[in-house]
């Protein structure tokens, strides 16, 4: 029916950083363990992030670190996780972890979850009695959808599974439990010989991939589903929106019908793991010329130049690990936002680029 190797294939992980940040300290990778009766294992009570650190001429640089950490805090807030971790503390922790790990490029995984207080164990659904833990790990990670995907594109299907409905599980939060839905989408796709699946929202409009946002190109215009289509407010999505402004490519956020996927000139996924990956077919129907289209290529090129530090970003997108200075705490122990990286400059078009994610929250 299908080759077992296709199911077991994973993204290449050449190196893992040997330390993990835990609640303010660095511990050995081998010591980063939880009790099997932890709340998170039974009830999915975690929120997390995925961040990439890129190799640049100025050393490793973390891409949109503050925005990722702000999304982590937003996800925690949605799930009523009351904690003391501040944005600056978490961003400092990431930079220190990367510096200590010595990797030029890596993928960073911060996670906050409900664990188990072994002195006063609580096993019910009510998460409040369970203590919160925060860990940050990192590893070198290859191309998420395959090495050839960035140039050649991927073959995908529309999933028979719908994305979460807004009033059941908020797709806006990057919560571990949401990824049970993502796993259904991904397993179905792989089992049927596709690389990835696209889920529709509960009204039948295009939502997103199991771990990526989606963009469509038609008549030179770029279209992407709005937040109301149960998507994660992707940080790569936001970056691509700003890149389109730079390139003066018209972009709209709008509901997309499934059939529009088949007749689009170009389609591509965006995500921290997937970066900007072209889609060459959907349900075995060829999209456009069946390879990376010209608009996707322009956007992708700019994205990779920015992430490599070869070209200024529309905002302070890169945190250079070797040049990082933690913000000094004020009298109350709070730290102001770190100064923007030197390559920062204003976007050419209207709107504060730093507001972009917040703007999308209101769609
Ligand atoms: C379900 C889902 N949608 C979209 C994305 C893309 O988001 P980002 O660009 O912030 O990585 C991800 C990846 O994190 C995801 O898991």
Image (cartoon, rainbow, N blue to C red):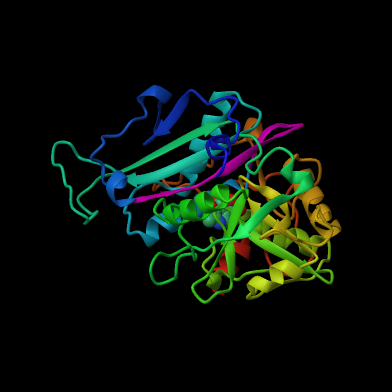
Q: In the rendering, at what x and y percent does residue 110 appear? A: 46, 42
Q: Is residue 337 in view?
A: no
Name the quadrant containing residue 346.
bottom right
Residue displayed at 78% across by 51% down: 300
Give the overall secondary structure of the magenta segment: strand
Left or right of 244, for residue 172: left
Residue located at (65% from left, 58% from top): 237
- Image position, residue 121 (x, y; %): 15, 42
For the point 39% across and 55% down, which residue is it?
A: 76
* Residue 327 x, y percent position in the rendering: 54, 42
Magenta-drawn stretch contains 50 = yes
Question: Which span of residues is magenta-colored?
Answer: 45-62
> In this picture, is 75 found above or below 326?
below
- Which quadrant is home to the N terminus? top right
Which sits in the foreground, 276 or 327?
Answer: 276
Q: Outermost residue, left direction?
A: 120
Is 117 rendered above or below residue 299?
Answer: above
| 301 magenta-colored | no
Near-viewer residue (121 or 297): 297
**Horizontal side of residue 55 vs 199, given as left or right:** right
Which residue is situated farthest in the front direction here? 1
Q: Quadrant of residue 104?
A: top right
Residue 127 or residue 277, whichever sits in front: 277
State the count of labels.
Answer: 0
Apparent side of residue 217 relative to residue 185 in the rendered image (left or right) = right
Q: Position of residue 168 (x, y in %)?
A: 38, 68
Look at the image and tell me whether residue 263 can be seen.
yes
């Amino acid at each position: 029916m299908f080759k077992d190797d296709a199911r077991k294939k994973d993204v290449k992980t050449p190196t893992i950083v040997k330390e993990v940040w835990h609640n303010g300290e660095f511990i050995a990778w081998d010591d980063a363990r939880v009790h099997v009766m932890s709340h998170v294992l039974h009830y999915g009570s975690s929120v997390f992030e995925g961040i990439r650190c890129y190799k640049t001429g100025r050393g490793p640089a973390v891409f949109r670190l503050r925005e990722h950490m702000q999304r982590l805090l937003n996800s925690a807030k949605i799930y009523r996780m009351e904690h003391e971790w501040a944005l600056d503390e978490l961003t400092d922790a990431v930079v220190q972890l990367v510096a200590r790990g010595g990797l030029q490029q890596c993928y960073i995984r911060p996670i906050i979850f409900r664990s188990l207080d072994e002195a006063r164990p609580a096993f019910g659904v009510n998460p409040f009695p369970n203590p919160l833990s925060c860990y940050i790990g990192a590893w070198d990670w290859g191309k998420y959808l395959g090495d050839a995907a960035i140039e050649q594109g991927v073959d995908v299907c529309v999933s028979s599974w719908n994305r979460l409905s807004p009033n059941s599980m908020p797709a806006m939060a990057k919560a571990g439990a949401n990824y049970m839905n993502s796993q259904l989408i991904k397993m179905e796709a792989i089992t049927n010989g596709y690389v990835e699946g696209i889920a529709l929202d509960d009204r039948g409009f295009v939502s997103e991939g199991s771990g990526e946002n989606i963009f469509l190109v038609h008549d030179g215009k770029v279209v992407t589903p709005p937040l109301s289509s149960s998507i994660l407010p992707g940080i790569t999505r936001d970056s691509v929106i700003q890149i389109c402004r730079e390139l003066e490519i018209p972009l709209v956020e709008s509901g997309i019908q499934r059939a529009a996927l088949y007749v689009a000139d170009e389609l591509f996924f965006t995500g921290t793991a997937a970066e900007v990956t072209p889609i060459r077919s959907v349900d075995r129907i060829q999209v456009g010329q069946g390879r990376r289209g010209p608009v996707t290529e322009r956007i992708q090129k700019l994205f990779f130049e920015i992430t490599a530090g070869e070209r200024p970003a529309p905002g302070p997108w890169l945190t250079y690990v070797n040049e990082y200075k933690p913000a000094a705490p004020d009298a109350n122990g709070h730290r102001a936002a770190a100064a923007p990286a030197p390559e920062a400059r204003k976007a050419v078009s209207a709107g504060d680029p730093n507001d972009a994610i917040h703007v999308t929250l209101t769609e």
